[in-house]
Each structure stands twice: as C-alpha cells, then as structure tokens.
Image: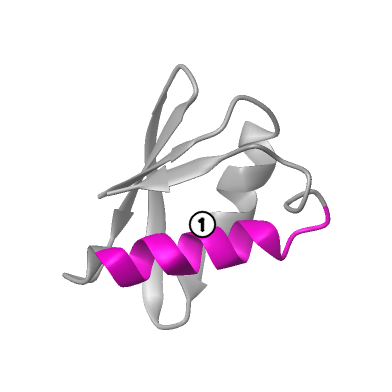
Amino acid sequence: MITVNCPMKQEDVIAALSGSHDGIEFRFVDKKGIKLHFQVDTEDLDQAVATAKNVIKATPFGNVLYFQVTK
C-alpha cells in the first residue's frame, strides 16, 4: 500500500492514479484527511511510489500541486 498526501485536488489525483500505470495496478482504498491510500499489485513499493509521482506530475495540475507519496 502507498499513501499520497495531498491537501488539494484529491478527487483529481484519485482519478489520475486509479488504474494501471507502467504495469502496476493502483486501486484507491480510502481517504483519511489529506491522506489517500492506494493498494498496489507489486512487491516493489519503491517503484510504485516513483510511478505514482510521475503519473501525478504528468497531469495538467501536477507541476504546481504540493503532494508527497510514501510507502
């Protein structure tokens, strides 16, 4: 499981990240405050974190959005 800490644009982040990216399936689990939890189908959480960051940064709002992705 990975966590995206994001105070703004949460629904947009969920929509952008949900699904398959670079062979990793991201499934939104729940939201607690600014923390968005995603289940991933890989054991390599470092790769999942890097992929999530790249997907969010590639969105139109990603380069100005403050967020953090952790495992």
Q: Residue 19, image x and y in percent?
A: 49, 65
Q: Residue 42, image x and y in percent?
A: 23, 71
Answer with the quarter of the image where residue 35 lies. Answer: top left
Residue 39 in magenta stretch: no
Residue drawn 51% across and 57% down? 18
Q: Residue furthest bottom?
A: 23
At label 1, counting other C-alpha atoms closer than 10 Å, the crowd grade (few under 14, some 14-19, many 20 or more) is some
Answer with the quarter of the image where residue 4 lies. Answer: top left
Residue drawn 27% across and 49% down? 71
The residue wearing badge 1 is: 18
Q: In this view, does 35 lie above or below 65?
A: above
Q: Is residue 42 above or below residue 10?
A: below
Q: Which residue lies furthest to the right in this view?
A: 60
In the rendered structure, the answer to whether residue 43 lies left or right of residue 38 reads left
Q: Is the magenta stretch mostly helix, strand or loop?
A: helix
Q: Give the range drawn in magenta.
A: 46-60
Q: Residue 64, image x and y in percent?
A: 78, 44
Q: What residue type is labelled 1?
A: Ser
Q: Which residue lies furthest to the left in this view?
A: 43
In the rendered structure, the answer to whether residue 70 lies left or right of residue 54 reads left
Q: Is residue 35 above or below residue 54?
A: above
Residue drawn 38% across and 60% down? 49
